[in-house]
Image: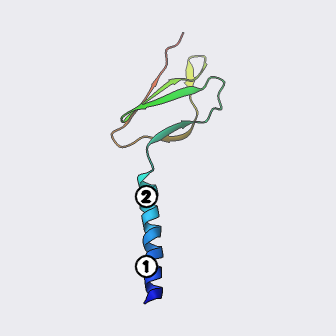
Amino acid sequence: MCHMKRKFQQYFWRCALVVFLALRVFAQITLDGSLPNNSNATRNGNIFNITGGTQAGSNLFDSFRDFSIPNNGTALDTFFFM
C-alpha cells in the first residue's frame, strides 16, 4: 500500500504543478528589441497600449517575442507620424 500511496503523491504533485503553471500564464506582449527604434508596451487591465516603433516611409514596424492577448482584450498600436 505504501508504494501506491507514494505513486499517488507523485501524481498529485505533478498535477498540482501543471495547474499552478497553467494559472500563471498571463496574457503578455514582450518586445524583442530587434528594431532601431523599439516600441513600448504597457498594460491597463485587458488593454495593451503599444507606442513607438520604427518608421519606414508611411509604415510603422513593431517586433515582438511574445504576443498574447486575453479574450475580450485589446491591443492598441498608437503612433503619431511627425
Examine the rendered structure and indicate whether residue 12 appears above or below residue 64. Answer: below
Label 1, secondary structure: give it.
helix
- Give the residue at mark 2: 20
For image coordinates 60% across by 26% down, the residue present is 38
User: Are the residues at dot 1 and dot 2 in contact (C-beta closer than 8 Å)?
Assistant: no
Callout 2: SS: helix
Please state the total of marks drawn on the protein image. Answer: 2
Q: Residue at x 49, y 30 (%)?
A: 41
Q: Give the residue displayed 56% in from the left and 17% down from the top.
A: 58
Circle 1 residue: 8
Residue 75, horizontal then vertical, whole percent: 42, 32
Judging from the image, the colouring scheme is rainbow
Q: Position of residue 42 (x, y in %)?
A: 46, 29
Quadrant of res 72: top left
Q: Is residue 30 above or below residue 13?
A: above
Which mark sits nearer the N-terminus, 1 or 2?
A: 1
Quadrant of the image for the N terminus? bottom left
Question: At label 2, which amino acid type do we have?
Answer: Phe
The residue most toward the front is 2
**C-alpha separation, residue under disc 1 versus residue under disc 2:** 18 Å
The numbered dot on residue 47 is none
User: Residue 33 at x, y = what percent?
Assistant: 63, 32
Q: Amino acid at mark 1?
A: Phe
Q: Is residue 47 left or right of residue 79?
A: left
List the single residue furthest toward the left. 72
Quarter assignment of residue 15: bottom left
The crowding category of the residue bearing disc 1, from other C-alpha atoms within 10 Å (few below 14, some 14 to 19, many at least 20), is few
Q: Is residue 6 above or below residue 34?
A: below
